[in-house]
Amino acid sequence: MKQSYIKYLEEIAGQDFVITDMEDKICYGYDSTRLEFMPDAIVKVKNAEQISSILKFANENKIPVIPRGAATGLSGGCLAVNGGISLVMLEMNSISEINTVDLLVQAQAGAVTIDVDRAANNCGLFYPPDPGSLKTSTIGGNIAENAGGLRGLKYGVTKNYVKSLELVLPTGEIINTGAVTVKSVSGYNIVDLITGSEGTLAIVTRATLGLLPIPKAKASILTTFPDTASAASAVRDIVAAGIITATLEFVDNVTINAIEDYLKIGLDRNTGAMLLIEVDGYEGAVQEEAEIVKEVCARNRCSSFRLATSDEERDRLWSARRAALSSLARVRPSTILEDATVPRSRIVELVEAVNAIAQKYSLSIGTFGHAGDGNLHPTILTDLRDKDEEIKVEKAIEEIFIKTIELGGTLSGEHGIGLTKAKFLKLEVSEDAYRLMKNIKKTFDPNNILNPGKLLIN
Amino acid sequence: MKQSYIKYLEEIAGQDFVITDMEDKICYGYDSTRLEFMPDAIVKVKNAEQISSILKFANENKIPVIPRGAATGLSGGCLAVNGGISLVMLEMNSISEINTVDLLVQAQAGAVTIDVDRAANNCGLFYPPDPGSLKTSTIGGNIAENAGGLRGLKYGVTKNYVKSLELVLPTGEIINTGAVTVKSVSGYNIVDLITGSEGTLAIVTRATLGLLPIPKAKASILTTFPDTASAASAVRDIVAAGIITATLEFVDNVTINAIEDYLKIGLDRNTGAMLLIEVDGYEGAVQEEAEIVKEVCARNRCSSFRLATSDEERDRLWSARRAALSSLARVRPSTILEDATVPRSRIVELVEAVNAIAQKYSLSIGTFGHAGDGNLHPTILTDLRDKDEEIKVEKAIEEIFIKTIELGGTLSGEHGIGLTKAKFLKLEVSEDAYRLMKNIKKTFDPNNILNPGKLLIN
């Protein structure tokens, strides 16, 4: 990057907030995909006005700008694939007082998800979206990816809680859009268009977020099944019984064995699949729902059923599910976490297809995830230093996606398209719809400076 | 319209489905605003392919096309303000079988809202959005306006249930967008951009809609207060107590008196305000919530509190609220139903401002609506044949909107901007955001043929 450009960025953001030395830049070249792309400059921004100035300048000079939160993303959304300026949002992390009447909070883009939730908790409220990375991830990143989480079935995803946004457009305009009211239909719904647009249409600087009252009671259940089909059938029957559980998590046999290798907590290695179920609400309702869940699981031949009676027991039940990814990650040098999502009714078919693909390519794939949402994470355990294996892995991933779409599913439930799935997007999106999306991108970002090389690449 | 154009439309849709005679056209010149604009031709379309052909033709020849459902809209969305072709969607009204595992139904745009709900009811499910016009309104119209309803606070609005759409773009392409899965983040969120875009970006032909299990129990409560402030304060305290009621309806003194004049059901004419509250869920939870609501109302000095103990009593309690609009409509020759929405915490200020404006212009304004959402319907009782009064009414409406925005509110909670509020939109939307919306419109509809003269007019 030209020295004069760097000088100008320093004028805008302050010399201490612009980083161009290679040693200092390195940790900004990665995200949770472990892919590496080096930006030319890192700017730690402090407000929307600075971002506006930087974008105007970048737009004039056609320099890529890539917003970056905590870099916990799993599709490469914050990587500087074409160099340019990495805009680090972490300094903008203020969280407003909680509005306990309107159930709202305002947070800057760099605020950490769990901090927003904790601020709400102090007032008897909670922020429902709970992506796996919530201890580190930022609200801006969550909005960019429309992050999901374990509570998606009952409580929805990030977009269901974003009421209004302060945005900076790629051409530098600062815009406030949306409304803090429960309902609003004034003009086009820019808020929901931006949410999930992966930082390619505008940079989110601040959001007003909806909150909910903390449920008075909850019940946590761990139940095991002899095979995937029975577990999946239990998932279907629970929903068909009219129960929308707070979480309904699935863990397959490969993952159970990886967890047992790691934690040695006495899981039965022959268990076909495990469900972790949580219902919440009022005491009486929770008991009633837990009772129905028990009946449904028994009817589907569960091999065991444990209802936690204390917080400690609840934590113990959850420790297995929480350890799923780290347990799988220990098995082989490389872990590729996918994000295939199908209608709930097609889960068995997806899991069986993944297992068949694993066998076909002699790969080890563990599958776990949010069964209630049909959002599963087939996780390929591999060694990408082995080039032959890398080719097999790529073929397997493509086959998983083709099958997912065939089952009426979607390429990504919560991780986004970003860099890693961009080449598959046309499996799901027709030529005409793809062209429409490209035209929308062009409307916002005529010079394609904002997060280029992501989402729409063809 | 040129005879050759009409001939071409007849070729596409069949001679019996194209109407150009004045007598036959008249009833297609109105909607529920009672404003009148005559289209040049009416085409009763039967499928997306016909619509595609018509739009290609209209786009080439720059003829306005206005989609029309049941015309129950309250902002003039389906009126042919510049003539052109009125596309009547009512023939496209099929409803698929209910998918009880994935909790989904597919409906064509012309399906009537209540028919979708009833189809779901037969399977123990329901379609939550419940606009006042649901017995007549169509799913396509609901999606165009992002229709709300009484259950908005707990269950959200139309957009929360639209999973995927079949659309025809103004340039004729037929597109399928969105996903039927619980979560999806594959590409830009076209579904939520179209929902609420008032038929100005694309014509919705089919939607996959989410459903929910019918709650096992409900409790209906009618409670009265000496003044608006106590009622509003009760609304705030109910939500602050952690209770998200299914409905939380407000009726003011003017409306109570109009209802009593009409129905003579023994309402106390001195009552300041009335709340109609419904909680639903499991039996035990419902009882617990009703108990808390009772305490909160007592603490806020309610003058009466009745909990319905039977379905008949529930119906009786609701009859007053249901009659609100028709009771007000009897008072004077013209009724103007507004749709001002503020954060829940500002309801008292809005109601007081409306009363002050009524006094200032010597107008009679009754206010009722969805207090839990902060979505109130100040209803001006007037006689628009009186030109002096018309001017006062216009001034009053403008002042109500200015106050609404001042209170952090939005011009429309659920009725849309359409024709009637288009001139006020810049009160809420900044110049930069307005320009962005116009650019989005242009991206979809380069020749401005689809529902011109609505929403964005400057």
Image (spheres, coloured by chain):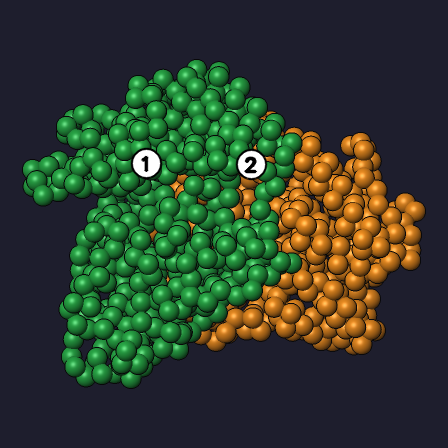
Chain colours: A green, B orange
Q: Is residue B97 left or right of residue B321?
A: left
- Secondary structure, mark 1, is helix
Which of the two labelled residues, at mark 1 and mark 2, occupies the earlier sequence position?
Answer: 2
Name the subunit of mark 2: A
Q: Which residue is at 43% across, 32% downward? A: A317
Instruction: Please state which of residues A153 and B184 is positioned toward the viewer in this rendering.
Output: A153
Q: Is residue B57 left or right of residue B248?
A: left
Name the subunit of mark 1: A
Q: Amino acid at mark 1?
A: Ala
Q: Tell me the crowding category of disc 2: few under 14, some 14 to 19, or many 20 or more residues within 10 angstroms, Cα based.
A: some
Marks counted in the figure total 2
- Picture coordinates of residue A298, whole percent (x, y): 48, 17
Q: Quadrant of residue B448?
A: bottom left
User: Residue beneath label 2, please?
Assistant: A218
User: Residue beneath label 1, please?
Assistant: A324
- Picture coordinates of residue B387, whole percent (x, y): 77, 74
Q: In the picture shown, does residue A18 fall above or below A189?
A: below
Q: Which residue is at 31% across, 71% downward? A: A44
Between the residue at mark 1 and the residue at mark 2, the CA separation in whole angstroms equals 22 Å
Q: Is residue A99 left or right of residue A315?
A: right
Kindly indicate whether the residue at mark 2 contacts the one at mark 1 (C-beta within 8 angstroms): no
